């Protein structure tokens, strides 16, 4: 019997639609397993800008820090996309990650046998793919100095990519530990042929792996080649560790191995304190309000939340198995249907919830 405080951050676009499904699922898990989840919603993103003028109100940060875990939908949308705007929804997300010390973003990419045809890639390439990405989340170019100046009468704008050895060490260490529980292989991805910061990354990663994980197979791949290898031999990768920007891009790419961005969950964790769980996709403005978004990424993020923050392994596995079962039975949201028959967000969510008690 577990009692836990969980903060829900629905955000923008499809965020509220998918978080509503997650909330229902958390209720069902609590009922079925006899837990008490105290759920509380808070503002982040564009809706927070509209209501408070800032993308991450202090109050939101406070309740999140005091919670056992946080579940986020998505932030952003065309309404707040003016390139000259001084506040942006995405700043709220970056700030909450930084303020909560969530330096590691775990993004599992697993293909489902029942969904092989949903991937644009050939079955024999994607079948059996099982990769766990560790994306560094509170450093790199996302958090480096930025600025602008005039040079020779022209504006010049810059973002700096910077890493410290300590930031690289801690994420590589997590990757090494995870690999020991998996297929004992770590691949570090960088751009060390060009970037100094990547050469530091490569040096520090190699030394952590050699000194602390000599039992784990280790290799390095340049990020441009990695983008290609992911599509040609995804099965060769077990744990992949990389910086903030490369991890962002490679995991959206890798989502197409599984069939849809709408399937992929993530966990953002730090050394201590609550974790933040979210789908890797965004607010999907093109389908927001239509009730057709795929809720599975968010439900799988709920599973990660239960496992990582609340140590509820049975409950997490129950959700994952329920998702498996529903997909095996042939149910598809529009993103997976390839033009065939499809069901909506709530219907898909309800099928998973119903399958939980079976
Ligand atoms: P996106 O991930 O929102 O959408 C990309 C494509 O995938 C769209 O065609 C969308 O319809 C589809 N898609 C995404 N999630 C889906 C789901 N659950 N079910 C079905 N289809 C889904 O990326 P984008 O369009 O480039 O960005 C839109 C906004 O979201 C931007 O403001 C961006 O900054 C923001 N964003 C937020 C997050 C986050 O909150 N974590 C992540 C990525 C993007
Ligand atoms: C993600 C998103 C965010 C990121 C944006 C919205 C700030 O793309 O969570 O993957 O780039 O980290
Ligand atoms: Mn992204």
Image (cartoon, helix red, strand yellow):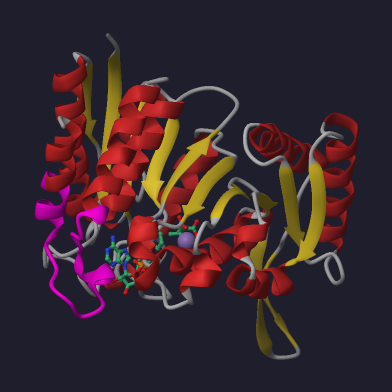
Q: Quadrant of residue 39?
A: top left
Q: Is residue 30 left or right of residue 159?
A: left
Q: x and y percent of residue 189 in the render?
A: 73, 59
The quadrant in which residue 28 appears is top left
- Give the side of residue 166 with respect to residue 77, left or right: right
Count the labels in the image.
0
Extreme top residue here?
1
Q: Say which of 55 and 284 sits in front.
A: 284
Q: Is residue 334 magenta?
A: yes
Q: Is residue 4 above or below residue 126?
A: above
Residue 213 position, x and y percent, is 82, 33
Q: Which residues are magenta?
A: 327-350
- Residue 214 falls in image quadrant: top right
Q: Residue at x 22, y 41 (%)?
A: 22
Residue 195, how many percent across, how many down? 83, 67
Asked if one can make out residue 68 in the rendered structure from this viewpoint, the answer is: no
Quick check: 111 above or below 355? below
Residue 232 lies within the magenta run: no
């Amino acid at each position: 019997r577990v009692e836990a405080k969980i903060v829900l951050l629905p955000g923008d676009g499809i965020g509220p639609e998918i978080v509503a499904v997650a909330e229902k699922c958390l209720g069902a898990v609590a009922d079925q397993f006899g837990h008490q989840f105290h759920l509380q919603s808070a503002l982040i993103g564009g809706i927070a800008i509209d209501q408070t003028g800032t993308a991450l109100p202090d109050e939101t940060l406070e309740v999140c820090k005091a919670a056992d875990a946080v579940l986020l939908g998505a932030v952003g949308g065309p309404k707040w996309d003016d390139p000259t705007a001084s506040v942006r929804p995405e700043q709220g997300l970056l700030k909450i990650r930084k303020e909560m010390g969530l330096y590691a973003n775990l993004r599992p990419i697993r293909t489902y046998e029942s969904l092989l045809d949903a991937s644009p890639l050939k079955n024999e390439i994607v079948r059996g793919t099982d990769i766990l990405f560790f994306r560094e989340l509170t450093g790199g170019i996302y958090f480096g100095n930025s600025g602008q100046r005039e040079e020779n009468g022209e504006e010049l704008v810059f973002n700096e990519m910077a890493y410290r050895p300590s930031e690289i060490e801690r994420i590589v260490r997590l990757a090494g530990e995870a690999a020991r529980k998996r297929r004992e292989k770590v691949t570090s991805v960088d751009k060390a042929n060009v970037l100094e910061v990547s050469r530091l990354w490569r040096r520090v990663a190699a030394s952590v792996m050699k000194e602390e994980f000599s039992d784990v197979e280790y290799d390095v791949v340049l990020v441009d080649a990695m983008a290609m290898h992911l599509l040609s031999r995804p099965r060769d990768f077990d744990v992949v560790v990389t910086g903030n920007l490369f991890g962002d891009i490679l995991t959206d790419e890798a989502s197409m191995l599984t069939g849809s961005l709408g399937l992929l969950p993530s966990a953002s964790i730090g050394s201590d304190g609550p974790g933040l769980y979210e789908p890797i996709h965004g607010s999907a403005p093109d389908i927001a309000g239509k009730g057709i978004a795929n809720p599975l990424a968010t439900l799988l993020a709920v599973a990660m939340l239960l496992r990582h923050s609340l140590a509820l392994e049975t409950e997490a596995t129950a959700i994952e198995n329920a998702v498996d079962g529903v997909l095996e039975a042939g149910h598809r949201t529009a993103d997976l249907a390839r033009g065939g028959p499809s069901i909506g967000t709530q219907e898909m969510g309800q099928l998973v919830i119903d399958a939980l008690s079976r």
